[in-house]
Amino acid sequence: MSGHSKFANIKHKKEKNDAAKGKIFTIIGREIAVAVKEGGPDPSNNFKLATVIAKAKANNMPNDTIERGIKKAAGDVGNVNYEYMTYEGYGPNGIAIIVDTLTDNKNRTAANVRSAFTKGQGNIGTPGCVSFMFDKKGQIIIDKEECDMDADDLMMTALDAGAEDFNEEEDSFEILTDPDGFEDVRKALEEAGIPMMSAEVTMIPQNYVALTDETAVKNLQRTLDMLEDDDDVQAVYHNWDE
């Protein structure tokens, strides 16, 4: 990740307004419901649920809200009809974009995602057309201002727990893991009392693309904003070097 800090993006997300935070909680609530339906309400026996809980905690979702969501989902399993759908495509200048959605209406979601691409002068491609440009990794971001542990000690704690890589940026630390080892590393950091700004399994671009044309930047931002505002969209990954 040399020279490319994720902290600015994470910090920007943390500083969004209450409406955006409400959307994040709604997104995580849906993910909890699906995870409970698929694997039961016990995170120790349900890796997907444990991962969603980690994401919830990193987004400052209160523990009682998490527990209520799990209990509600456990008692309402038959009524959970959300389905995961992933869309891949291109923004201006060939920027690669992956959109993860969780929806109860595939037609609505497909139309909204297609509209977001079109209005930003991009287009949806076929499955797999850009995902090969990304690596699926567990990613943990730690704010230096909130972490009392020495960088070397933090790195050893992460590596000993199974992390693959440790990067130090100007204002943050980034820990990367194999997706299957993510929960072990996250749990080790939690037990060590290390605060995490972000902890999730994500898609990391292998290379980043810079945009210098102002119109292209505006068009791409329009697509990303429309996707961000869509309640069915869970996550958006791209290789734009912001």
Image (cartoon, helix red, strand yellow):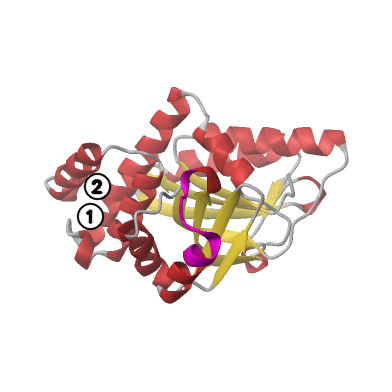
Question: For the residue carrying disc 1, how many other residues have a C-alpha within 10 Å: few (<14), some (14-19), or many (20+)?
Answer: many
Which residue is drawn at the image coordinates 61% and 55% (left, top)? Answer: 88
Outermost residue on the left side: it is 75
* Residue that appears at 53% across and 73% down: 164
Farthest right residue?
213
Estimate the x, y position of residue 240 in percent, counting from the top left.
72, 49
First reached walking from the N terminus: tag 1 or tag 2? 1
68, 167: nearer the viewer:
167
**Of residues 6 and 96, which is closer to you in this image?**
6
- Seen from the viewer's position, the closer of residues 205 and 230 is 205
Badge 2 element: loop
Q: In the image, what residue type sits under mark 1?
A: Val
- Is there any visible trace of residue 104 in the rendered image? no
Image quadrant where residue 62 sits: top left
Q: Which residue is mark 2?
A: 80
* Residue that carries the numbered disc 1 in the rendered image: 36
